[in-house]
Amino acid sequence: MLTTLLVVVLAPLQVELPAARPVPRMQVIPLPGGQASIERDGREICRYWAGPELRRPFLFPLTGPSGKSLTRMGHPRDPNGHSHHNSVWVTHHDVGGVAFWNDAPGSKGRIVQRRVVRYEDADGEALVEVVNAWQDDAGKTLLEEQRAMRFRPQDGGQWLLVLDLAFTAPKEPVTLGKTNFGMIGVRMAKTIGVHDGGGTIRNSESGVNEAGVHEKPARWVDYSGPITPNAREGITLLDHPTNPNHPTVFHVRDDGWMGAALTFAAPRTIEPGQPLKLRYGLWVHADVPKPESIDEQFAEFAKIGDPPTKKE
């Protein structure tokens, strides 16, 4: 018995795209509900939340090289009293006498996203730029904020967030009161905390853990600890040398919280026509890096200039 084998070769059923451009490594993917996903090589590393139901925008998750978020939503032992601890957020306790910091009944301030200026994709960085209004409970805008968030990939799954903030008083001077709380806060994952996970806090001045870091000025503070059974990772909060209070005082706790306190020493008044500009960095990294390695990251961060001009 003979068997005949018929082989049919078909030409590829496709159309060439001679003008096709390379897909950017870093992309911003707009999503419903005021969200935007930031992807590196097609995988989300961070998400920006700015829906109309929120008291303030925030970033969650901040995904480390292991694929786990290095931040969390809420205090691990007081989720109700610290419901405002939304991963990474920007706000201030006292803006012209109005409390914007937390969700308590006396906190009447609200940060409302007015518009998206632009989303930009590129191999070297993804950019999200927005305009926010800081409003009291009557809807009066006390501050106008322009926020640019630049997400820069690094080797080994690491990455850097450069956060540029510009605050303008629209009609009359606005004073940021003296406080520990503001302008930026970071709530670390529970397992990274000193208390809950056996992690560690260090700063640029050789301070260690809350006792050596809390309410101390520094160029940077690093919070690192276990994130999986086999991985140690962390985030370094960097204070740019151009900030008016550099080196800033950091508000840091062993329970997994860190923030940069702009007005720890004294109030600061923003005059109309004289914007307050701030720049912070968050280095999402593997392992528990030596201070020398963090100093190298800070040196590179210190060289960073303004975001690229908007393309028309």
Image: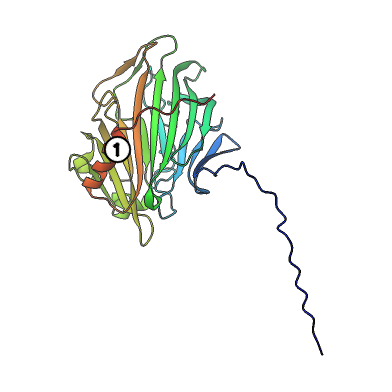
Disc 1 crowd, CA 10 A, few/some/many (<14, 14-19, 20+): few
Instruction: Identify the residue at image location x=29%, y=38%.
Output: 300
**Horizontal side, residue 271 vs residue 148: left or right:** left
Determine which residue is flagged by label 1.
300
Q: Residue at the spot x=55%, y=33% of the render?
A: 51
Circle count: 1
Residue 92 x, y percent position in the rendering: 37, 26
* Viewport quadrant of the C terminus: top right
As drawn, is 109 to the left or to the right of 220?
right
The quadrant of the rendering that contains the N terminus is bottom right
State the residue at coordinates (29%, 33%). Answer: 302
Looking at the image, which is closer to me, 218 or 1? 1
Q: In this view, does 199 lie to the left or right of 118?
A: left
Up/down of 97 relative to 241, above or below: above
**Above/below status of 157 relative to 104:** below
Give the percent coordinates (x, y) of residue 282: 35, 39
The image shows residue 206 at horizontal and vertical percentages of 17, 43
The residue drawn where x is 27% and y is 38% is 298
Residue 229 visible to the viewer: yes
Kind of residue at disc 1: Glu
Vertical placement of 232 versus 159: above or below? Answer: below
Viewer-proximal residue, 161 or 106?
161
**The furthest residue to the right:** 1
What kind of element bears circle 1?
A: helix
According to the image, what is the colour scheme of the structure? rainbow
Any part of residue 98 in sight:
no
Where is residue 72 drawn, in percent x and y? 42, 46
Instruction: Name the foreground residue: 191 vs 64.
Output: 64
